[in-house]
Amino acid sequence: MKIHKAELVISAVDKSQYPKDDLPEIALAGRSNVGKSSFINKMIGRKNLVHTSSKPGKTRTLNFYRINDRFYFVDVPGYGYAKVSKKEREKWGRMMEDYFETRKNLCDVVLIIDSRHLPTNDDLQMYEYATYLNIPLIIIATKVDKLSKNKWNKNVNDLKKVFHAPEVPIIPFSAVTGMNKDKVWSELEKYM
């Protein structure tokens, strides 16, 4: 997909702030510091539309990025970050539940995980939650540039076993090299 236009439309904390147009939305979920921002930037061919941070837990809102006036990437707060207060985590949880359970425009969840590690309990819960809500899923295994090809092939096969999801695409991805960017777009275009 050729990206001609990409912009942050709104950072929302409740449904009254969600975009009013009727474009499809693809939610990007994953634990803090897994590479969601780098994934978005690489997919749209921009270096800094989505700010990356070395500090986990920077995304605290639902960030709606309109792409080509055709669909939205919705960056949701990362989970599993311990340095955020319990009250703050609960607030994020309610905000995300409200979005995932009530947003009709939500057509796909991209679950982003680090290819170097097995999924955390939080990753598995996110997978089960989206599955329970009947939201289609794509799993992106990031940071494969940090592994040998044999190692990331093994890790992707291990992910398939852990998720028990032969029908869910699990795509190795590198935000450094752009590896499998076209493959990811062809999966995403099914939902637009």
Image (tube, grey):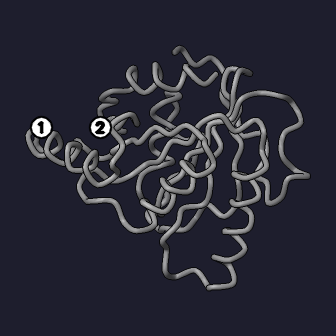
Q: Which mark is residue 172?
A: 2
> What amino acid is found at the position of numbered circle 1 in the picture?
Lys
Above or below, 136 against 81 in this view is above
Q: Which mark is residue 8?
A: none
Residue placed at 48% from the left, 67% from the top?
A: 56
The answer to whether residue 16 is above or below residue 110 is below
The quadrant in which the C terminus is found is top right
Query: Closest to the observer: 122 or 4?
Result: 122
At 48% across and 53% down in the image, what residue appears?
Answer: 127
Q: How many marks?
A: 2
Measuring from the top left, give residue 13's x and y in whole percent. 79, 60
Numbered badge on residue 149: 1
**Front-most of residues 44 and 107:** 107
Percent across and percent down for residue 9 are 78, 39
Would you call the spot at circle 2 few (<14 residues within 10 Å), some (14-19), or many (20 or more)? many
- Identify which amino acid the numbered label 2 is placed on: Pro
- Residue 77 lies, in percent from the top left, at 60, 60
Q: Residue at x 49, y 27 (%)?
A: 45
Q: Which of the marked residues, 2 or 1, is nearer the chain's N terminus?
A: 1
- What residue is drawn where x is 20% and y is 43%? 157
